[in-house]
Amino acid sequence: MMFQGRNHAGGGSPATRPLTLLLPALVALALAAPGVVLAQRPPELVDRIVAIVDEEAILQSDLDREIELYRMEKEYSGEAVTADAETVRREMLERLIESKLIIAAARQADMQVDDAAIQQSVDQKIEQFVEHFGSMENLVRELKRSGMTLGDYRNRMGSQLRDQQYLRLVVGKFIRPKVEVMENEVRQYYLDNLDQMPAEPDSLTIADIMIAVQPSLEVRQAVQSEVKKIQGVLADGRSFADVAREFSRGPNAKRGGIVGVVSPGDLFDANLDRAVFALKVGEVSEPVVSSRGVHLMRVDSVQGANRRAISQIFLPIEVTQTDVDNAKAAIEAAYRRVTSGEAFSLVAAEVSGDPASARNGGVLGTFRLEDLSTQFQEALQDVQVGQVTEPVLTPAGWYIFKLIERTEGHMYTYEELKPNLHQAVESQKIEEKLAEYVAELRTRFFIDKKTG
């Protein structure tokens, strides 16, 4: 949890004892032959203090490591760092300062953390990162790129987990006992946030006919040849990451093909989803053809039943306008047949390029409207049961849909959401009380933020 930053630099009481710290410096020393006078080099600053909290110094190196860990955690979870460098620096410094304040308050109350449990958690976290990056060697390389050693990471992660334990202890002793959630507050929260309350959307049972936009024979043969070459290199024992860097033409090639952590439905193509969640850790899929190209998928680690850290080698398949026009002509022919009275199921079984639905007369299944792509939602939004949409062009190809059944959605009631609402109100109150508590700690303990 990260608190909101404050603008003032310090506080404290007259009884607070000022602290003077000397920074370490490196002085160049050398052995010389007798009689040779060596020129002295000026001291070289290797670290500096960026803040002091209750006689505890926060060093520039601490702040740098906190920033790099923040970036690594974001990358690990598949999120992008959108804030500028100065904003990240300021927020990370405030996080370190407030962690020091929490620790000072906890120690003042004689609270103790479980160091053995912390080290065990650090080991588990390292194991997760090893699985995510494919090997300990890759993790060490990634840490080095961020200016850290494995020892640095252990120390900083241990500090973070220790801070979190202290925070839980402080919240449990000083904050949560003061928080009471009343029934009327939970109901009012629901009423005040009706526009943000989740709702069960419409669900649609649909059938489809799909005509893929096929690249030319020459393009397909060239890609197949490249795929066989890549598979041969992998079979010879080269690491997936190295092969991805050399051969992949996807946006993550320079990172060894690392995509990130995904859950079912996160990938843009159902075939990719099926391939990824059928693999074991370390396994590489057979070539998977999507609307964008050919993918060789690898599962780097399994994180629970429904989360996988994955990498890929990607080869795009280029299509021309002629390819698009040929597919359009085929889907328009299918559209004329079904709108002229032919059974949708028979036409789908005969011409559809979606094999999974074609076997069932085109029936795809039942979906929540919001789970469909934007293009599909727009095509189906106002369609009545039994009607067929006009052809729709998507990255996967041309589609026509038939709406078989529509079930109207509804907003979840207060009673259905009550447990979650209670937790939301309680969390909100804890956040507010914690912010007040930290503000009060700023007046109790000495804080000095350095400039420059």
Image: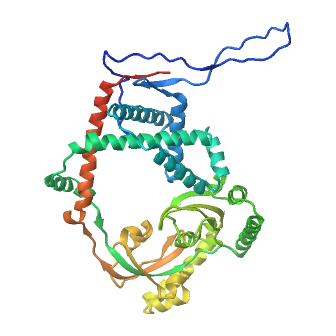
Give the percent coordinates (x, y) of residue 109.
32, 34
Q: How many marks?
A: 0
Which of these two is toward me, 351 or 310? Answer: 310
Which of these two is toward me, 243 or 45? Answer: 45
Give the percent coordinates (x, y) of residue 216.
69, 74
Q: Where 419 falls versus 180 (above or below)? A: below
Q: Residue at x 59, y 74 (%)?
A: 213
Which of these two is toward me, 384 or 9? Answer: 9
Q: Residue at x 73, y 56 (%)?
A: 246
183 left or right, relative to 325: left
Give the percent coordinates (x, y) of residue 437.
28, 34
Is residue 432 visible in the rendered image? The answer is no
Which of these two is toward me, 252 or 302? Answer: 302
**Which quarter of the rendering shows the N terminus?**
top left
Q: Residue at x 84, y 9 (%)?
A: 36
- The colour scheme is rainbow
Is residue 250 visible in the rendered image? The answer is yes
Q: Where 298 falls versus 37 (above or below)? A: below
57 left or right, relative to 253: left
Instruction: Kindly give the residue lying farthest to the left in the view shown.
Output: 184
Give the percent coordinates (x, y) of residue 416.
23, 66
Q: Where 15 falls versus 187 (above or below)? A: above
199 left or right, relative to 26: left
Q: Residue at x 36, y 71 (%)?
A: 369
